[in-house]
Amino acid sequence: MDETTFRALLAQQGYGEVLVRELPADTTLAEHHHDWDARLLVLSGELRLHRDGESLLFQQGDSFEVPLGQRHAEHYGPSGATLLTGRRYR
């Protein structure tokens, strides 16, 4: 998915906060959860998301969701990652 289409989707689905996050190479974020729904698009690099006993790899152009309260961990690849992130507060 491209950035323009993704931004339109975020607006349509009520994601009021949109930001770009840059994560350094080989960064690991221990298991945690958010107080918001998150929808993300990988603009560059890659990340591995660990949730519900699964390990999922997302690369440039991939998008995914992390619902409010879902426990997960993140690991960013050897070149890090840049993410377009939408947050929807309930």
Image (cartoon, helix red, strand yellow):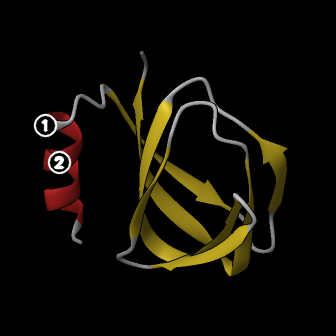
Residue that sits furthest to the bottom in the current view: 78
Q: Residue at x 46, y 34 (%)?
A: 37
Indicate the quadrant containing the C terminus: top left, top right, bottom left or bottom right.
top left
Q: Which mark is residue 12?
A: 1
Q: Tag 1's secondary structure?
A: helix
Residue 14: name its quadrant. top left
Residue shown at the point (14%, 59%) measured from the top left: 5
As drawn, the residue found furthest toward the top would be 90
Image quadrant assignment for residue 88: top left
Q: Which residue is mark 2?
A: 9
Q: Position of residue 76 (x, y in %)?
A: 71, 70
Q: Report the number of numbered marks.
A: 2
How far apart marks 1 and 2 lie (CA) works out to 5 Å
* Residue 51 vs residue 42, the one in the foreground: 51
**Element marked by disc 2:** helix
* Amino acid at pointer 2: Leu
The residue under the point 70% across, 74% down is 55
Label 1 crowd bin: few (<14), some (14–19), many (20+), radius 10 Å: few
Q: Which quadrant of the figure contains the N terminus?
A: bottom left
Q: Are marks 1 and 2 in contact (CB under 8 Å)?
A: yes
Q: Which amino acid is tagged 1?
A: Gln
- The residue under the point 54% across, 31% down is 68
